Image (tube, rainbow, N blue to C red):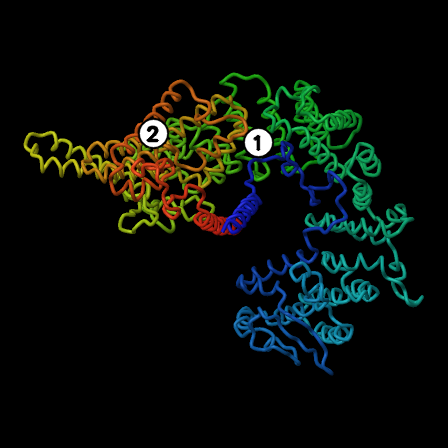
Amino acid sequence: MKKLFLLISSLFYTLNTFACWSPTYTQEEHKHYLIPDLFTSSYYSQSLIPTSNNLHYDVDYNIYNHEFDVLANRLSDLGISQSTIELMNSRIVESVSVDRDYINISFKNNYKHSKVKIYDITIYNFYPKKIIDEFRKINQIDLLNYLMYRHIVLFDSKYFAFNDYKDQLSGSFYLSDQVKIKLREVILDELSVAPTDLREGFIMLLIDMNLFSRNHIQIVSDYMLNLNSKKEINVVAYSHFAGSVVKMYAVAPSYAYMDYRNNNELSVYLFSRLFEYPKLFRKAMTEISFVVADKKDFDWNKCFSYCKKQEEKDRISLAQVLLFSGVNISLLDYFKDNTTSDSKLFELALIQYVQRIEYHLFSPLYLKRGFYENYKKTSDAVNKFTLADAIDLQNYIYKIDVNNKVLLHLLRGYLSFMLGDFSKARREYGFSKDYLKNANYLSKKEKDGYAKQLEGLLVLEGYNRDYSINTYKQLNNRLTSFLEKTYESESMDSYFELGMEHAVKRHDFAEAFCFASNKGYHLKNILDIFMDNDDLHEILNKINQKRIPFNHRQPKDLKYVILEQIGTNHFRDNDLTLAKKYFDLLPDHIFDGGTGGRAYYQHRPYSWNYYDFPIDLSKKNSKIVKTDILKRYNKKTALNKIIELESEIKIKENRLSSTFYNDTVSMYFLRNELSNLYFELSCMYSSPFWGYSRFWSSGLNRGIYYLDAPPFNFLETQFIKSKLDSFLHKYGNQYKSIHFLNKAISYEDDQEIQAQLNFKLYSKLKKPFLTSFHDSRYANSRWWKSDLWNMNYAQKIEKSNLKKEEIIIALLIDSLYRNTNYYKEVISECSDFKREKIDKETKGEIEKPEKIEQVGVNYKFVSLFLLIIVLGLFFYIQTLRNPVIYD
């Protein structure tokens, strides 16, 4: 049994380690106040400059995903159902073979279709009738016919390789040369009669089919004959074509496309055209990297010779720069020398290099609570290498000249700001604004974008100076206005955090709440730990007056959230009438099970829901709780029940004190009823859910742990501690339960029940804090200890009194209730009450071994207990890995 105990213990610790594999995202780390999307209109990727050379790895965005997306959009526009769209972009073919003159198709097991083998390929023996009818209804049978061949051909491509890894290893997904020859004949026949809008699709299939047979001559030939003259390129076919140029060897001198034979430089030029597609930018650079590495004497001048206009030369120059490990000023200067003064690509490269400096400077400052005073070169939070890069870049940007003076002075100002020279920053921002007035080279949209970016940078600079309370309010209004008129709100996290951070510093938690998000439990900690009822009413007034900013970032039904929190705060303060007032303002369904009750703003389902928490009304400490002594409540019904119980207690206490009911029998029954009522109150307050804010979405035990993370690390440690101590003394302990249990004991006359109630009281006094986070999360915090370890004088007295009461109750139980049945059956099993000395009545006689009470570990029980915990953790982890989102 001991071996089993050790085995299960080991498994428990292993699973507990696994549970840490799903870390909670806490805060925004990428500090960007320069937002290129505000003022650039380039179609190029906004990630031109990598922090290091990461080209030689599998790019997440598969080349086929582009064709995937195009087809999905086309089918969606036609009104095709989502399930059919997903089927058309799924692998349903298991194998393809040739049997004499017929192509033989077999389907995968998960594709439920009546036909398994096909000799005469038609949509009628390939697709179910339901799908055929769906396409016939919109007059798109020809499109379905093309999709059938697409399913046959693409099952052979790397389009599916990531999803069918086992098939890839076995090689079962490759088409044989015999199949490809026959299939090419069939597709060419289809191509000859296909509608114009489907011809390109069939040609793409011909190109794709030859990719893995390495028939690069045929790929180049098919592309040049059929697709080269098209204005808009088919990126999948084009990518195969560009790659085939490297591998194509002419078999005969008369071959029509001799210039495309084994030409790495032409291939790089062709691949650079894919830079126009943002999602494919990294993929294209990866291909270019391989092509350049394939030829030792790669000739960049030859590569430039294929360029017909400056923009094409800029793309080649960009490719040259990106092949190096990272980017420095020398490479940036080389890029500048090879572009024109109005090159959009150079502008983007310059912007993104500034962003790289920005991130490496600001992120550590943000995490270390500093921003304004930490620009000093002596600050530990500033990376010395990044600082040197920033100084080099500042010197470089004051030497160069570009046509876009608005951008040039904006970046000069921002670099000065990052290096702590605020006056120079303001001066450069002023130059940028002046140039903006007459910048005819910018579109209206770009002008508006630059104006917004400059406004944001000026607000940022304003926050980092000493300011009065009036200036603070003006800055908040400017920041709010700036964020409300930017169309790139999803990119503005750093600005939202700027407002939240400075509001938190000012203890203006109502304002901080407006800027906050769900990251790092910011909203939850501000709402429940830092905001008082005055702050909550301020938010409520803004909601009622429709003045709450950024409502798209706020939780759904924010008004209900605030009302419930105000009611919960009153509930914790024992202001039951006020708590009921606010709970009654909430719709009934909020507290129901299922839809509303599972926390209407909850992100994950949990087994312990607040709409249906159980109250155990048993007086015995039994391992098995009967259903008839379990009652279930939500927070509102629990409040109403407590009000009802207190009202009934008041009536019965008045009756008990009246002379009319002073006879012994009546008094006995009244005292018994009062004891039961007080005991039920004690049970109600024993569960933590009566005062739990559902806004935490069951995350309080984790979320409370992040009070030492930004933006709360800007607050004084003692202030945070006082807020948290106050919170935990109102919620998360059994003080109220202990109080009402003492009252129940004072009215109870039956000695057996007195023993039961006193033992319950003793158990609560031993551990007065009920919730798991109270001891483990708060007490083990990295930078302070809980009030149990670091208390003020009043708290020490309170703790001391609890300890004294615990000792008194233990002595009381041991002296008064030793002869009760409950003591013998239940209390005596508790280790604190086990008789470790030989009973005096034995007069020194040694008891028989079988009667000696085992005081050591009960391995059988503990093993069973650990096994239950292990299974519970397993299902909990599975729940976290498969979250359910509730609207």
| Front-lying residue, 647 or 260 | 647
Q: Amino acid at mark 1?
A: Tyr
Q: Nearer the viewer, mark 2 or mark 1?
A: 2
Q: Secondary structure at mark 2?
A: helix
Q: Which mark is residue 495?
A: 1
Please give the name of the residue rendered at 90% of the width and 66% of the height, measured from the top-left corner.
Answer: 255
> Marks 2 and 1, Cα distance to the nearest angstrom?
53 Å
| Image spot of residue 139 (x, y percent) | 57, 70
Left or right: 776 as drawn, with respect to 286 = left
For marks 2 and 1 on the same chain, the one whose residue lies earlier in the sequence: 1
Q: Is residue 160 visible?
A: no
| Image spot of residue 204 (x, y percent) | 72, 64
- Would you name the residue on which mark 2 appears? 806
Left or right: 838 as drawn, with respect to 324 = left
Q: Is residue 271 above or below residue 495?
A: below
Identify the image quadrant of residue 529: top left
| Image spot of residue 803 (x, y percent) | 36, 26
| Front-lying residue, 72 or 856 | 856
Q: Which mark is residue 422?
A: none
Identify the image quadrant of residue 809: top left
| Front-lying residue, 495 or 273 | 495
| Residue sitting at the far right | 253
Please give the name of the residue rendered at 63% of the width and 38% of the height, measured from the top-left corner.
Answer: 445
Q: Amino acid at mark 2?
A: Glu
| Mark 2 and mark 1 residues within 8 Å of each other at the beta carbon | no
Please give the name of the residue rendered at 70% of the width and 30% of the height, measured from the top-left corner.
Answer: 406
Q: Is residue 54 visible?
A: yes
Query: Circle 1: is it few (<14), some (14-19), or many (20+) Cα within 10 Å?
Result: many
Q: Is residue 283 above or below residue 23?
A: below
Query: Circle 2: is it few (<14), some (14-19), or many (20+) Cα within 10 Å?
Result: some
Q: Secondary structure at mark 1?
A: helix
| Residue sitting at the far left | 660
